[in-house]
Amino acid sequence: MPANKGLGHTFDTVAHEYDKMRPGYPDALYDAVFAYMPVDAASVVAEVGSGAGQATEAFLQTGCSLAAIEPGANFGALLREKFAKYPGFSLVPQKFEDAVLPPDTFDLVFSASAFHWVPEEVGYPAVYAMLRRGGAFARFANHPDRFLANPDLSRAIDEVYAKYYYPYHNLPPRTLTPYDASQAEQRAQIAAKYGFTDIRCHLFHRERHFLGEEYIALLGTYSDHIAIEPVTRGKFFAAVAAAIDAHGGILTLHDTLDLQLARKV
């Protein structure tokens, strides 16, 4: 589902569930980031929208100094606990748009499944200003597809959304389409509008498998699902779980992960 720009705060209400259910990122993605912009103990790094830190530790393990920009109070407490053993970790408890960060300082700024919450015309110039010359911006995200593995199950879940989700949000039902290379490249080229160069794009793929109760636990960490009032949400989630049980008991997500890299001249 596309992010509703007014719902970013909802994630913080389910911080521990988010930490448990949201996936991390494959080693190959981090390898691509570090091949483009090496990071070590001398590096200064910032993360935009750390959430529960699904991507944070891979960077802290390099020994770098890392400023995690995360406004959620519950997420902040979770991050401090998880990464207390890393002396280079610090928390900036503000929205990225409101944070005052030193210019021309950071070797790398990255954002994992969070930068879409920042208005483009604010986020890209702010990142560019933060980076030192030659520094890099890495933006990456996960795009799950439930149709590929079991179209019949996916259509059954679409019927559940048509009954509960779309009416609640006053939206017309729509067909979800897989995220592909052309979309990833289009997203990568946004950086060019704001002065970035050496733009690159990578795609990665994986599968995840869920029982019905596991999948609705994952849905319970999505902002637009959290926003549904509890009684309707309970019926909605129960119907999704029932659809999974009626179609073999397992839902498979095919994830496409995109990575966009860009450099400050």
Image (spheres, helix red, strand yellow):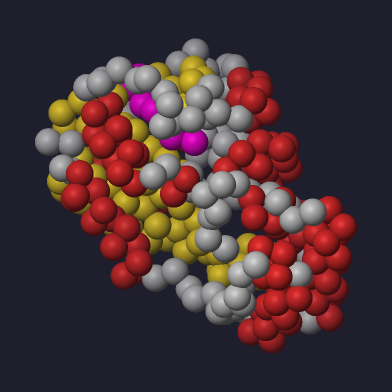
Identify which residue is drawn at 27% across, 26% down. Answer: 130
45 within the magenta span:
yes
Residue nearer the viewer, 223 or 204? 223
In the figure, is residue 156 to the left or right of 86? right
| Res 207 → quadrant | bottom right
Identify which residue is drawn at 53% across, 60% down. Answer: 2
217 within the magenta span:
no
Quadrant, the C terminus: top left
Quadrant, the N terminus: bottom right
Magenta-drawn segment: 41-49
Examine the rendering and report whether any part of residue 204 can be seen.
yes
In the figure, is residue 98 to the left or right of 39? right
Identify the residue at the far top of this view: 87
Identify the residue at the far front of this view: 170
Residue 124, compared with residue 94, is above or below; it is below
Examine the rendering and report whether any part of residue 205 can be seen.
no
Image location of residue 138, percent across then percent down:
34, 43
Residue 49, compared with residue 91, is above or below; it is below
Identify which residue is drawn at 44% across, 69% down. Answer: 179
Image location of residue 6, percent across then percent down:
56, 47
Residue nearer the viewer, 81 or 35? 81
In the figure, is residue 2 to the left or right of 149? left
